[in-house]
Image (cartoon, rainbow, N blue to C red):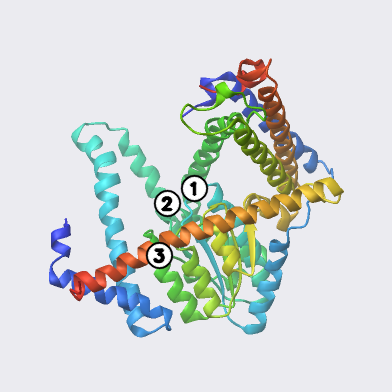
Amino acid sequence: MPTAATWSHPIGVWFGAIGTLALFSLIYRENRVYRLFEHIFIGLAAGYLIKTTWTEVLGPQWFTPLFHDGQWPWALVAGFGLLFYTIFSRKHSWMSRIAIGALMGFAAGQAFQTTASDYIPQIRKSFKPLFVTPDQIPLGSGLTTLGIGLNNLLFVFIMVTVLTYFFFSFEQKNKVVAASARTGRLMLMFAFGAIFGSTVMARMALLIDRVWFLMHNWLHLQ
Amino acid sequence: MTHASDKWEAAFLVALWSIIVLVTVITAQRGKKYLIRRIPGLNAIDEAVGRATEMGRPILMVPGLSALGVVGLQALTIFSYIIKTAAKFGNRILMPVADPALYTVAEEVVRESYAAAGRPEDFDPTSVYFLSDRQFAFASGVAGTIHREKVAASFLFGDFFAESLIFAESGQQVGAIQVAGTVQTTQLPFFIASCDYTIIGDEYYAASAYISREPTLLGSLVGQDICKGMMLLIVVLGTLALSIKPLGDKFFFVQWFTIK
């Protein structure tokens, strides 16, 4: 298991620095160095996938219960999982559909559960009083009844207009509906603008981290 | 996690909404005509395929990091339509996949789409390939593919995260026409900024009904709209109930939706 100490070894730092610069070279143009490191990256990821599949999934969740704890029904799961590999045989590929169908069934079943666990509580959380009394203000929050009331009104307004935009089964020609949908779209764009700004800041942090690695760990510039 | 069985009100709503969708699906299958409003981003799919035909360069379809679930399968449904259109014109397609389970389904979908278009012999098994399940290894592979193949059209549908802008920016650099759609709210701004057309939020789920016009899917969409209308009404009534002092949060209607 490579530790942070292993990767702080000069060979690890040099490999990391050259890899970083090679992948950044795509900004200029696609080139052979990028291609080489792209394939090394994908190859390393494939090796990592095989390792983590064993150490995090197959080992603790299948091999240990089956061979160490004697829970023999896990042997059936292996047969089921192996059905996926029949897709590579033209003659037996129909068998893979059994496994795929079962997985899709699980996904569909989970969708019902998500509706109950996620969406219905969201409906309740969308109930917000438009007229707020002083006893409804959180202690020490410094908020006012008018402020919370306006905030709640804005929330309901945006929710109604955005939801109107996402109705598909009729043409939005009615003036009120069309105006509501247009406003909803505008509100979405405001929100996307805010998300864009904050996410770009997060990406800049990633870039700064890489530049810091190159300057501090590799070039030893203080 | 709350289960429907933990509170009968939640179970009742899930059952009611399911029945509404089932009824509209059945009525659509029995011939009732349902309408679907125009979604501009989806009209652009044919334009993008046409452009790839003119340029004689491949079409790229990326389902992002989607696993085998609702989002991933919806992406494959949209790709199936694109492949059928592309097959008519003999366009080459490329589909890198990041999830091993989705990869098996994707290969089946591509093969069947070529068969449905009457061109089963054009199916190239190497056009659908598993790259990596590691986010940035996958991103570097897709970016490299976009640059090397100089794709003419890029369709990004599915679950995308921090790698979204790497794909969209690479597509921009090679001059590809790009159509993207995701339900990941944090990635939509990047697609809006860098793609030619973007499918936002719930439009993503309406896409398959819109492009196929299949009665079952249209019926389902109408059913979902009715459910959305009900939710809207419930929220307005709940807000009014909380706003009227004598009713408040002890009012039975508000209590009904309060899941502890």
**Residue at label 3?**
A204
Mark 2 Cα within 10 Å, few/some/many (few <14, many 20+)?
Answer: many
Q: Quadrant of residue A25?
A: bottom left
Residue A156 in sight here: yes
Residue A91 in sight here: no
Quadrant placement of the C terminus of chain A: bottom left
Going from the N terminus, do you reach mark 1 or mark 3 first? 1
Residue at image location 24% in from the left, 35% down from the top: A65
The answer for which chain carries disc 1 is A
Going from the N terminus, do you reach mark 1 or mark 2 first? 2
Judged from the image, the secondary structure of the residue bearing numbered disc 1 is helix
Relative depth, front residue between B128 and A24: A24
Q: Are marks 1 and 2 in contact (CB under 8 Å)?
A: yes
Residue B48 % position (x, y): 66, 73
The answer for which chain carries disc 3 is A
Locate residue A20 relative to residue A91 in the image: left or right.
left
Amino acid on which disc 2 is placed: Phe
Quadrant placement of the N terminus of chain A: bottom left
Residue at image location 61% in from the left, 30% down from the top: A145
Locate residue A29 relative to residue B45 in the image: left or right.
left
**Residue at label 1?**
A100
**Residue at label 2?**
A84
Q: Same chain for marks 1 and 3?
A: yes
